[in-house]
Image (tube, rainbow, N blue to C red):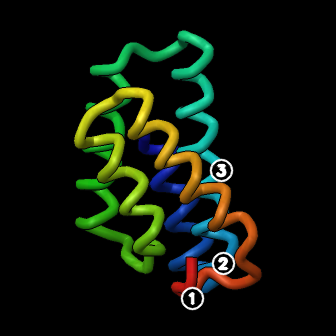
């Protein structure tokens, strides 16, 4: 988790590149969801990870796309087939956006 926050912060705070920072976060979150699907995470582990990451992102560095926070919130609510499908659907729609400061997902 520290590495994720460090990389995100590097993009957002140092390089002032919100687009790449948020794309990085989205890729990591989607990767972890797929790892869960492959059996590498237990439901409670994924839920706890999402909750902790969301909490740390709220504390800073900031500038997180609200749809990324929504994905984490969905996972935090509970890890089940419906929530995983919803989180991946939002991620899929986000990948189609050409800018992360637009909120028309």
Where residue 1 appears, x then y in whole percent?
Answer: 43, 40
Where residue 29 appears, x then y in whole percent?
Answer: 54, 45
- Label 3 vs label 1: CA separation? 17 Å
- Label 2 vs label 3: CA separation? 12 Å
- Label 1 vs label 2: CA separation? 8 Å
Give the mark nearer the N terminus: 1 vs 2. 2
Give the mark nearer the N terminus: 2 vs 3. 2
Q: Where does the C terminus fall, quadrant-wise?
A: bottom right
Do labels 1 and 2 touch, CB within 8 Å? Answer: yes
As drawn, the label of residue 101 is 1
Instruction: Please report the residue visible at 26 percent of the width from the left and 66 percent of the height from the top.
Output: 58
Element on which disc 1 rests: loop
Residue indicated by mark 2: 19
As drawn, the label of residue 27 is 3
Where residue 95 appears, x then y in whole percent?
Answer: 71, 64
* Left or right: residue 65 compared with residue 104: left
Residue nearest the observer in this picture, 10 or 87: 87
């Amino acid at each position: 988790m520290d590495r994720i926050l460090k990389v995100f912060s590097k993009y957002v705070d140092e390089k002032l590149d919100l687009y790449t920072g948020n794309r990085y976060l989205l890729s990591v979150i989607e990767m972890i969801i797929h790892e869960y699907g492959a059996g590498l995470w237990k439901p409670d582990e994924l839920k706890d990870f999402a909750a902790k990451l969301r909490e740390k992102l709220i504390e800073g560095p900031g500038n997180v796309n609200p749809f990324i926070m929504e994905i984490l919130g969905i996972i935090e609510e509970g890890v089940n087939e419906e929530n995983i499908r919803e989180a991946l659907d939002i991620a899929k729609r986000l990948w189609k956006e050409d800018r992360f400061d637009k909120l028309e997902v």
